[in-house]
Amino acid sequence: MQQISTLQKVVSELHEYKREKTVLEEKLVHMEGDLVRKEALLMQNVDIKKELNDIKQTNRQLQQQLKQLQEEKDELLIKAEALEEKLKLKVEEKMKQRHSVYHRNKREVKNLLSVRNTEIVSSNISLEFGNVSISSVEYSISPFHLTIQDSHYDSNDGRHESELTKAMEANNKYKVRATR
């Protein structure tokens, strides 16, 4: 009986070992799964770090390009401002030239209006009042009368046309004063 008891004890221990072996095998399978997941995460982590480094490098390049573009933009803005200033000066110079020609022609018209003797002139002349030009003029000038016949004028600016009208009105006023 003792042998049976020892045999039962050995069988019992064998079952216990088998059960522990099964539990340990399950733990081993579980740990192997964890290890595989950790290795996969580690590989992912390496890939993510590599991708992050690539992104950082690309970001540095883009920042450098942005800086270069900003500098180029600033240079172009400075050039544009210089060109605008140059254009502004040319426009002012052109306006001064037109103003000067206008006043010179206005003086010539006043001189023509101040002639005391009657003259009849028929010629191909061209008078410019800024943007107004009069050509192929036949006119008669006396202290009291100015007529312009068959006149042709071009005007891009009604202001200069009104200056001619003012000159003619001034002549009419002169006539009225002179007849008194």
Image (spheres, rainbow, N blue to C red):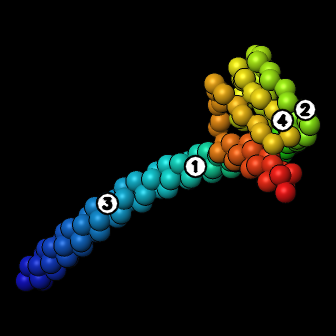
What amino acid is found at the position of numbered circle 3 in the picture?
Answer: Gly
Tag 4 near tag 1, CB within 8 Å? no
Tag 2 near tag 4, CB within 8 Å? yes
The Cα–Cα distance between marks 2 and 4, rounded to whole angstroms, is 6 Å
What amino acid is found at the position of numbered circle 1 in the picture?
Answer: Ile
- Foreground label between 3 and 1: 1
Looking at the image, tell me whether mark 3 or mark 2 is earlier in sequence order.
3
**Residue beneath the point at 81% across and 42% down:** 144
What amino acid is found at the position of numbered circle 2 in the picture?
Answer: Asn
Tag 3 near tag 4, CB within 8 Å? no
Looking at the image, tell me whether mark 2 or mark 4 is earlier in sequence order.
2
Numbered tag placed on residue 173 in the rendering: none
Residue identifier under label 1: 55
The Cα–Cα distance between marks 3 and 1, rounded to whole angstroms, is 32 Å
Q: What crowding class fits label 2: few (fewer than 14 Cα within 10 Å), some (14-19), or many (20 or more)? A: few
Residue identifier under label 3: 33
Residue identifier under label 4: 142
Q: What crowding class fits label 3: few (fewer than 14 Cα within 10 Å), some (14-19), or many (20 or more)? A: few
Residue identifier under label 2: 117
